[in-house]
Amino acid sequence: MSLKITAEDLQTLKNFIVPLDTQERRKAYREGDFPRAELCKDVDKRYRWDLLHLSRIKIGDGVGVQGNVNLYSYMDDSHIDSALRSFIKPLKSVS
């Protein structure tokens, strides 16, 4: 599957997010130890997006809102989630 995100923007996301993807944080999410866990239907997706928000990366649209990456100028949330999935492994994965 090819991603819609540019290589440069993907690398920027990785630079902000990968350091936050720790074994301790992964364990907490696997065990349901995060805010409002009881309402979560997809813990892997929740984990990816929580990491994105925790990174404090600014995502802009390139027009009215400038960011570290202007993903919304050419992507929507489903494309962003695909990009996140490309480097944030599922919580249950072994490695």
Image (cartoon, helix red, strand yellow):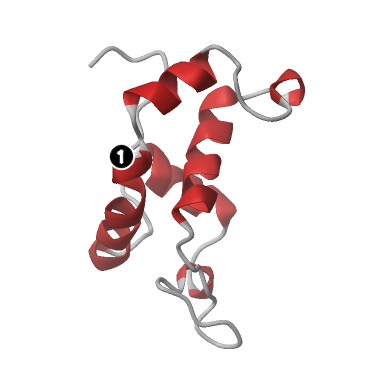
Q: How crowded is the residue under tag 1: few (<14 C-alpha within 10 Å), some, or many (20+)?
A: some
Residue 1 is at least partly visible in this image: no
Residue nearer the viewer, 45 or 54: 54
Q: Secondary structure at mark 1?
A: loop
Q: Residue 70 falls in which quadrant of the image?
A: bottom left
Kind of residue at badge 1: Phe
Q: Where residue 4 sits in the image (x, y, percent)?
A: 38, 58
Residue at the image position 75 percent from the left and 18 percent from the top: 38
In this picture, is 37 found above or below 59?
above
Residue 12 in the image, given as x and y percentages of width and height: 30, 62
Which quarter of the rendering shows the N terminus? top left
Residue at the (49%, 68%) spot, across then down: 58
Residue 75 in the image: state x and y as whole percent: 50, 63
In the figure, residue 82 lies in which quadrant?
top left
Horizontal side, residue 83 vs residue 30: left or right: left
- The residue closer to the viewer here, 90 or 77, is 90
Vertical placement of residue 12 versus 44, above or below: below
Q: Residue furthest right?
A: 39
Quarter of the figure with the C terminus? top left
Name the side, left or right, on which 67 lies relative to 9: right
Relative image position of residue 28 (x, y in whole percent): 50, 19
All told, the count of numbered labels is 1
The residue under label 1 is 87
What residue do we see at 49% from left, 59% from top?
A: 56
